[in-house]
Image (tube, rainbow, N blue to C red):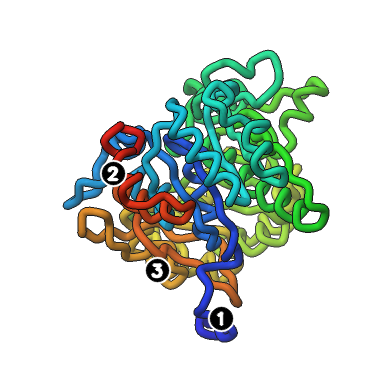
Amino acid sequence: MTKAQFYRRARTDLPGPLAGVRVLEVTTTWAGPICGAVLADLGADVIKVEIPSGEVARRLPPLLPGSSVSFMHATANRNKRSLTLDLRRKEGRDICLKLAARSDVFLENFTPGVLEGYGLGYEDVRAVKPDIVYVSISGWGQFGPYRERVGYDPLAQAFSGFMSLNGEPDGKPTKTPTFLADDLAGLHGAIGALAALRHRDRTGEGQHVDVAMLDGMLFQSNGLPTLGAMGVEPTRMGNQFGFAVPANVYKCKDGMVYAGVLLDSQWKRLAEIIGHPELAEDPNFATLKGRASARDACDALFAAWLAERSRAEAIEILSRAGIPIAPINRYGEVARDPHVRERDMLVPTILEDGSQAPITGPAVKFSRTPTTVRSGAPALGQHTEEILAEIGLDSETCSKLREAGII
């Protein structure tokens, strides 16, 4: 299928499948903002509420080259509208509640209890919008012994057990280079919001959706918590797998690849390719059990074959034979890859300072209601008066609010 064939029935009059849904987002840094970004990418009208000085993601380095915009802000706040509002003051809270009364989803990611202290907790919002879907993302969740602890991404990676298995067998536990716990919490927050909206549309009932970064890490741990609970502690294997031999990072003449064998049928083909056809049926190599016992020998044979070839040559030969292989790219390399470009995973976008940057695009593709990066992350307060006008506040009132530091 070509790209044109996939989108042949696409509509051009909608921003995405969530057109008509309004999200009021009161978040900071990454887990909450990336949840809002997913919903915004899907076509929702997401209003990002920030204190008048702006949230921390606007200031975190590095800035995008040739721009004054932070990479975090540009990525996580695209497709949103910006409203500045001091929620710690009564006037700001009251405006927020008026906006909540016109919203479908209220999204926040503060430590449990913080927004309740501002008069913007679930019960407060529910009082003005009984069917609100109120999504809370935090490190440890809304209940449980650790609910009031500070929660950050590496803490969830550490506590969940993930970090204990990440890294080389003889190295120390290692966090991921990306905000994995934040990202997973944001995705589960978006999934939770969509499920709750479906329930609301069927029953008229809103609800509080509680997402913990720890729970997201545990859920995405491939069943390892179950093994641990039953007394089976997995061991760190670095780039290898217990159920795939050989499988590892290998060096070619001009770079590194990840390659391996998952199925016995793949091993039979690989044995022929690497010049050892006798091992295709050898009982010590023909089955996963045999290869696992001869892991070092399998690894050495595969590594020797790859070392004599360029990455392009190895990828061409093995891919044609149905053997799993991929280059180990730097982000600059993957950004230039034609497959990535064809799938619109980097969308040229005008930023708030007038510069342009290739912003990471939505992952899910919709044939009928396509999604994209429609607008760059907004300037601080860019849509404040526009949004306040939607709830009946005129320019004179906005001027007074600005003079008072509320907006």
Residues under labels 3 and 2: Cα distance? 45 Å
**Residue type at the position of mark 2:** Ser
**Separation (CA) of disc 1 from disc 2:** 43 Å
Q: Which residue is disc 2 drawn over?
A: 399
Label ID, residue 173: none
Q: Nearer the viewer, mark 3 or mark 2?
A: 2
* Sequence order check, earlier mark of 1 and 2: 1
The secondary element bearing badge 2 is classed as: helix
For disc 3, the marked residue is 341
Residue 307 showing in the rendered view: no
Say whether disc 3 or disc 1 marks the residue closer to the N-terminus. Answer: 1
Furthest-top residue in view? Answer: 145
Q: Which quadrant holds residue 284? A: top right
Q: Nearer the viewer, residue 371 or 263?
A: 371
From the image, state whether disc 3 or disc 1 is nearer to you.
1
User: Local crowd at mark 1 within 10 Å, few (<14), some, or many (≥20)?
Assistant: some
Say which residue label 1 marks.
Answer: 10
Residue 91 in picture, x, y percent from top left = 44, 33
